[in-house]
Amino acid sequence: MTQKSFFEYLNIAHIERIHSQLLSWIISKDCEAMNAVSKNNFINNLFSLVGERQILNVETEHNNIDILIETDCEIIIIENKIKSSQHSNQLERYQQYCDYKFKVVKPKFYYLTLIDENSNNDDWIRISYHKLFVALNQQTLIENSHSVILKEYLNYLKKLTTVVEDFKSRTKDYDMVFLDGKKKKSDKINFNYNNDFEKFIADNQLETILQKSFLNRLKLQMSEVSSHITDTRGDALIDFHIKNDIWYENRNYATIIQLQGKTIKFAFSIYGDKYGLSNKTWIEKIIPKMEYIALNNNLGYKKKCNKPTSKAYVSISKKMNINYWHMDLEELSGFIREEISNGKMLTETLINHLN
């Protein structure tokens, strides 16, 4: 890889808002690195649009919207997700605001993502950072102080997208992505990584989002099963829902099979967005029933349950004998389907005890 870009030296290249600010500046009238024709071509290429336009206004963090571009013929809304994932119903809230704010022109919504994550909302068109790099790199720059900044940003985008593509093609070689998510940045500074790509990932704290990119491919492979990807303390995880309508003491619960690290869990948890507000006292009566399942299963789960710490979540777990990212997606999805089948049997047992 080439030497560090200016943005890497400033230690800001991994910050999502920096990319939003840069993209807004590039499109705005203030940026003199490209002329109006090049900016128009950039917009057309990035958003798959046609025609000429005049840029009237560009804003970031407008009512929490990452980027808002107003031209003489359209409104463009961008949700920028370089390292994070969407949460709650944020996209729907932005749409509701835009419906109220823009009465004449219907905005176009775009979901900018590093790992090709779906937005789970058909109104939002997915665009990738790779497409951003290609669309920007195609433009002719005007040699001045602003073009120096833009060239440095292009340098960073090239490295970023190259690393992501290499990870996708050689996931099995990237143990550090899956093992170093918990590490503090200070612990990575003087670590002797195998190559420049690993060092770039560590410097930019990309471990968790790259884990999610692999789990997202697993999610697509198993599209017949409802699933959800999130993370805890740097380790990405995926929940495969088994039964989502288990009513217990006037609250809706679910059973899930969860994959995180080398651990498989069968869990009973409050369902949906109520988890963050839940309390472990809600499921105190469930613990003995999960302990019974732990003691009486022949599916490899440990003979004790993982009791809730603060939220309405209790589980039993077992260790895998292989790192899941070393498995082919077809092999891994077959393994998970088998665990889901086991989870269905455990769910029936649990429900019988609830009744």
Image (tube, rainbow, N blue to C red):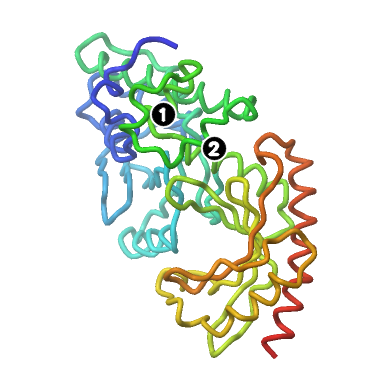
The residue depicted at 44 percent of the width and 68 percent of the height is 309
Q: At numbered mark 2, what does the secondary structure look like: helix, strand or loop?
A: helix
Spatial CA distance of label 2 from label 1 is: 12 Å
The residue depicted at 55 percent of the width and 90 percent of the height is 249
Residue 121, picture quadrant: bottom right
The residue depicted at 44 percent of the width and 58 percent of the height is 87
Residue 315, picture quadrant: bottom right
The mark nearer the N terminus, 2 or 1, is 2
Q: Residue 42, how many percent across, how many down? A: 41, 26
Disc 1 residue type (three-letter): Ala
Q: Which mark is residue 332?
A: none
Q: Residue 308, how many percent across, how many down? A: 49, 70
Residue identifier under label 2: 178
Label 1 Cα neighbours within 10 Å, binned few <14 / some 14-19 / many ≥20? many
Residue identifier under label 1: 202
Residue 36, picture quadrant: top left
